Amino acid sequence: MAWFEREFIAVPEDRKHQLVYKWPDLNIRRYSRALVNADEIALFVRSGKIIAALGPGRHRIDADELPVLGALVDTLTGGNFYRAELYFVSARELPGIKFGGRLTDIADPVSEQVVTLRAFGEFALSVRDPGELITGLIGTVDPADPDAASRWCAALLLKCMKIAVAQGVSRGEWPVLGLSGQLAQIESTVLRETNILLYEYGLRVPRMGNFDITLASEDAERLKRLAKDRTYVRMTGDFGRYAAGEMAIGAGQGMARGGGDIGFLGAALGLNTLQQQTVAPPLPAISPVCPSCHSVRSPGARFCGDCGTELAPRPACRNCATELRDSAKFCGNCGTIRQ
């Protein structure tokens, strides 16, 4: 009898960080000692049903002391073994579980551009009901896998975040370029939806740690550029002016990168075009008219060539010396006011 009592069943030290630990042997020797820590609970399972539960402490595996174990006696061994699955479930909160990956491709309502969103972070996990956890996980994940439950919960949380973010962005509640400012609201929504799905499995996500939702780098650069374009067009009130300014900036950048001839040629052509559009053509010269016979004479003539009448000198602009018409108040060439 003393030899049997030297066999102990407990969670190994290197497995105490796990949410669930499954004892590897289905044959549990009678009179063994089960050591259950203060933050654990041990569950005996047979055919998918919880047969017995052991709280914190040292327990002797014996149907005489624990009558509930009577249903687990293996009669083929003469009653020396109990045949069952034994699980140790942690009652403490497990923080720092990583999650992350691609969320979704979604159209930005502002720019109408399709962008890719990604999320990365961590969360904490705790057991709400150990019995529901064991019976719910059997057939869903492998309880013997130390990280199976954590990975399954991380995938479920990422799925809930994908749905929540897609709905929030499509409804215009959360801007794509401003998702980092909505993390508190996103966390609240994701936790609520995730815990609804985890309830039947006896699990709970009490909180999320540091996490962020980001754009692919090329998508972020594209949206920033479009936002800048919209702002400039709104400020100038004219897309043509904005486009001309962008061309000028591009010409300057081209010259800085070594394309001096092309940039200078483009700038020169643009300048010539602008000058042709803004400079008025010169006015035709004013020919004198004879006051006697009304013949038109060449500019500068002092006498009429037809009748010999002396022609009075025409008034001239005091600025550019251009001859002025009798009724002119301003010089037609330079705009100077007539004296």
Image (spheres, helix red, strand yellow):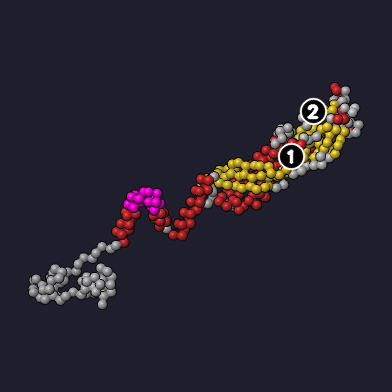
Residue placed under numbered mark 1 in the picture: 17
Quadrant where the C terminus lies? bottom left
State the SS at label 1: loop
The residue carrying pointer 1 sits among few (fewer than 14), some (14 to 19) or many (20 or more) residues within 10 Å by Cα, namely: some
Residue name at image x 52 percent, y 48 percent: 220
Measured in 3D between alpha carbons, the distance from the residue under mark 1 to the one under mark 2, in whole angstroms, is 23 Å
Q: Amino acid at mark 1?
A: His
Q: Nearer the viewer, residue 260 or 107?
A: 260
Report the residue at 28% width, 74% height from top. Answer: 337
Circle 2: element type: loop
| Residue 68: image location, x then y, percent | 87, 33
Q: Residue furthest bottom?
A: 339
For the view shown, which residue lies furthest in the right direction? Answer: 64
Along the viewing direction, whichever of 86 and 234 lies nearer the viewer: 86
Describe residue 39's horizontal placement relative to residue 205 as left or right. right
- Relative to residue 231, is residue 300 depicted above or below? below
Above or below, 138 against 261 in this view is: above
Q: For residue 112, say whether it is visible.
A: no
Q: Is the N terminus in the top left, top right, bottom left or bottom right quadrant?
A: top right
Q: What residue sits 67% from the left and 38% below the top?
A: 151
Q: Does 187 appear in magenta?
A: no
Three-letter amino acid code of the residue under disc 2: Leu
Where, by quadrant of the figure, is residue 317 drawn? bottom left
Could you tell whether 166 is left or right of 131 in the image? left
The residue that label 2 is drawn on is 26
Q: At which x and y percent is residue 17? A: 74, 39
Boundaries of the magenta span: 250-265
Could you tell me if residue 145 is visible in this image?
yes
Q: Earlier in the sequence, mark 1 or mark 2?
A: 1
